[in-house]
Image (cartoon, rainbow, N blue to C red):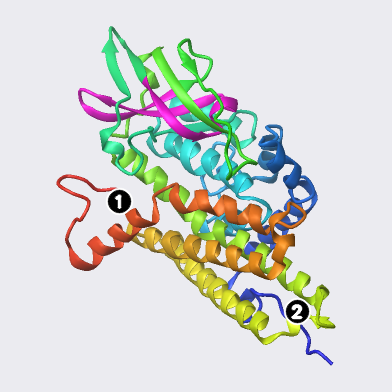
């Protein structure tokens, strides 16, 4: 008779490392994902869309800007936010991306760098999911080197005129407000751009093979005129956008593990049910070796994420530590998804199971918010003291 089974994140019995409140938040988000996202996400993925109305449900649950204080935000700590990201990404990376872009990029930029007027105007509506935000930093030719951006903001009387394009912008074509970063005579500055401003457009990007249950757009700014108070007053240079990216990367450190856990749980259930040579394939030594190796990496990744979360809550987290977490956890989660696919065989390539959908999504997560190569160089610089990005270049 088989011994009692444990889940892949239960092997080390780590629940005692989480508070009752943290466990309750995690359970609430897991239940929401099970009821609202999991039954529908394969259809969204196949259709290449994400329901915009989900924003209000995220808002009602307190997920949007949940780690920010005031202005209608939930005001939780970093670890509960990370656990929420993990549960969202167990549903789909697109759901976690929506919440991450809204809260950790667009809302955080206003909360950290905006004026009181900007905060009062936008943050309560964004926290409720009544207004959707996007974050315009990346350009087609300037991903890992945002300092080279070509988008330009020039003074015109008392206001500003913005011209340029941004690429790979989550939520762009459904956003009510865009945080746009542009070159000025005084360096890189951020601007709060209502998307109904004349000259602003956001055509949707199609033909994606990854993150299909997510809306991705190009931002086009053609003579967009803004008042002087549209600029984020406290953000000067790359420090502003990079601080936002560090916030978003933190959510990924936890989030990617959700996709990996969902793959592993699905695969264990499948292997117990699928017979080959008159026995469950879960009973074969090679299958158990794969399951053991994947569980080991998943558990190690969770302990790493939790440690990074505790550092963040203690005010001690450094960007290079976030780079370490993202590099490891996304890389290992992608490998887990690919290995799980081998156990499912042909069944693994269909939308009946989430495994290849997660693997495809993680291919995007691997390279957005900083590629693996970039995060490796951040870690290398910390270890050697030598900046390998080139003269005057840095992404941390």
Image point (38%, 58%), residue name: 323
Residue 6 at what x, y percent from top left? Answer: 72, 80
Residue 82 at what x, y percent from top left? Answer: 55, 57
Q: Residues within 10 Å of mark 2 (few under 14, many from 20)?
A: many
Residue 281 at what x, y percent from top left? Answer: 75, 79
Which of 279/120 is in front? Answer: 279
Which residue is identified by label 1? Answer: 396
Q: Earlier in the sequence, mark 2 or mark 1?
A: 2
- For this view, does 51 lie left or right of residue 391? right
Q: Mark on residue 40? A: none
What kind of element bears circle 2?
helix
290 is higher (above) or lower (below) than 346: below
Image point (22%, 51%), residue name: 389
Which residue is identified by label 2? Answer: 281
- For this view, does 194 lie left or right of residue 26? left
Q: Residues within 10 Å of mark 1 (few under 14, many from 20)?
A: some
- For this view, does 109 lie left or right of residue 359? left
> Magenta part mainly helix, strand or loop?
strand
Q: Residue 181 colored magenta?
A: yes
104 is higher (above) or lower (below) than 125: below
Residue 138 at what x, y percent from top left? Answer: 39, 35
| Residue 52 figure quarter | top right
Most extreme residue toward the front is: 277
2 vs 1, front mark:
2
Image point (61%, 39%), residue name: 214
Residue range highlighted in magenta? 164-192
Q: How many marks?
A: 2
């Amino acid at each position: 008779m088989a011994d009692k089974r444990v889940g892949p994140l239960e092997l080390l019995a780590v629940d005692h490392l989480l508070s009752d409140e943290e466990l309750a938040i995690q359970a609430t988000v897991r239940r929401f994902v099970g009821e609202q996202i999991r039954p529908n996400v394969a259809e969204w993925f196949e259709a290449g869309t994400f329901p915009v109305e989900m924003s209000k449900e995220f808002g009602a649950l307190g997920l949007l800007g949940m780690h920010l204080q005031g202005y209608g935000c939930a005001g939780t700590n970093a670890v509960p936010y990370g656990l929420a990201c993990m549960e969202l990404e167990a549903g789909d990376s697109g759901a976690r991306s929506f919440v991450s872009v809204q809260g950790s990029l667009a809302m955080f930029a206003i909360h950290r760098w905006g004026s009181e007027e900007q905060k009062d105007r936008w943050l309560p509506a964004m926290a409720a999911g009544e207004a959707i935000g996007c974050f315009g930093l990346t350009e087609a030719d300037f991903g890992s080197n945002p300092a080279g951006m070509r988008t330009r903001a020039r003074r015109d009387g008392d206001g500003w005129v913005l011209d340029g394009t941004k690429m790979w912008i989550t939520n762009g074509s459904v956003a009510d407000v865009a945080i746009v970063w542009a070159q000025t005579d005084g360096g890189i500055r951020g601007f709060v751009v209502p998307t109904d401003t004349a000259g602003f457009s956001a055509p949707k990007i199609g033909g994606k093979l990854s993150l299909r249950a997510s809306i991705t757009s190009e931002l086009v700014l053609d003579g967009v005129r803004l008042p002087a108070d549209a600029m984020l007053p406290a953000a000067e240079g790359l420090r502003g956008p990079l601080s936002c990216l560090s916030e978003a990367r933190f959510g990924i450190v936890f989030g990617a593990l959700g996709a990996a856990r969902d793959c592993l749980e699905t695969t264990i259930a499948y292997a117990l049910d699928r017979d080959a040579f008159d026995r469950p394939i879960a009973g074969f030594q090679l299958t158990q070796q794969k399951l053991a190796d994947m569980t080991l990496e998943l558990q190690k990744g969770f302990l790493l994420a939790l440690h990074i979360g505790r550092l963040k809550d203690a005010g001690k987290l450094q960007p290079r530590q976030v780079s370490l977490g993202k590099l490891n956890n996304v890389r290992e989660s992608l490998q887990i998804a690919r290995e799980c696919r081998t156990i499912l065989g042909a069944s693994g390539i269909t939308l009946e199971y989430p495994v290849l959908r997660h693997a495809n999504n993680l291919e995007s997560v691997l390279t957005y918010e900083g590629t693996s190569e970039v995060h490796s160089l951040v870690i290398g610089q910390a270890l050697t003291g030598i900046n390998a990005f080139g003269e005057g270049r840095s992404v941390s």
